[in-house]
Image: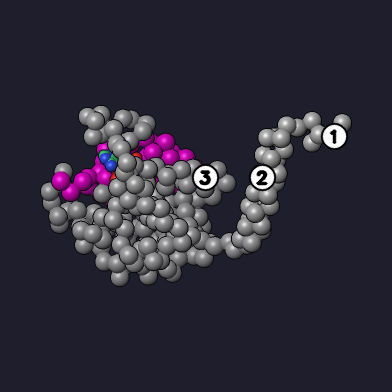
Amino acid sequence: MSETSTLSDEERRHKERTRKHKAVVDAKIAAAKVDKGLVLVLTGNGKGKSSSAFGMVARTLGYGRKAAVFQFIKGKEDVGERAFLSRQDGVTWENCGEGFTWETQDRSRDIAAARAGWDKARLALADPSISLVVLDELTYLITYRYLDLEDVLPAITARPAMQHVVITGRAAHAELIELADTVSAIRDEKHAFRAGVRAQTGIDL
Ligand code: ATP
Ligand code: MG
């Protein structure tokens, strides 16, 4: 007896549906032939922007490639991603912030930290040996006018052809979205913080 003759009607219908689905997916995969360095913008008010960026750092390192992370805004506080990723081979990690603005309350110091961080990020964006550059919380520097888009956009556009860049932060500017190849706006449907749960290590930091 052949395999199909032993299948129930439902199993046969499922097999036929998935066979058609596979043909459609395979055709789409075959049509995507371009390799290029991507700009990804992860924005929106929901949780998951920075942690997604660090997931891509892990993927990059998994191939023995190099990644550079610039963590703007956040200060000296210990976060799990830095503790783990900064001790892996192939990562350079720069903390370019003095902490949240409502913590530092010192605009000129925040601006100096942001600009010093950006000067280092610019070097990474010119280094073809670095496969992935993460500009974590970059959008705030533009919103607060610590950096001009006229400084940021040309450095990203002129980067090596195969280098990927991930930008995170809420309220990404139209120009960044325009420049990006992939944009995800993470929606905040629910967050445990609003139910009184404080930030949990391993999940939030
Ligand atoms: P994560 O680093 O967890 O991926 P994120 O980068 O999307 O978060 P940020 O706006 O950078 O979010 O905020 C960082 C911290 O704030 C994390 O601890 C995160 O859980 C928390 N957070 C993110 N979104 C919300 C929200 N809508 N309400 C309250 N806290 C949030
Ligand atoms: Mg973040």
Residue 41 figure quarter: bottom left
Q: Secondary structure at mark 3?
A: helix
Q: Which residue is mark 3?
A: 59
Instruction: Name which residue type carries label 3.
Output: Arg
Mark 1 Cα within 10 Å, few/some/many (few <14, many 20+)? Answer: few
Residue displayed at 47% across by 54% down: 132
* Residue 97 placement, left or right of 49: left
Instruction: Name which residue type carries label 2.
Output: Arg
Earlier in the chain: of badge 1 and badge 2, it is 1
Residue 191 figure quarter: top left
Q: Which residues are magenta?
A: 74-102
User: In which quadrant of the rendered image does the N terminus lie?
Assistant: top right
Give the Cα separation between the discs numbered 2 and 3: 33 Å
Q: Magenta stretch: residue 93 in it? A: yes
* Residue 196 placement, left or right of 49: left
Q: Nearer the viewer, residue 120 or 187?
A: 187
- Nearer the observer, disc 3 or disc 1? 1
Image x and y of residue 52, in percent: 42, 45
Earlier in the chain: of badge 2 and badge 3, it is 2
- What colour scheme has been applied to the protein in the rendered image? one colour
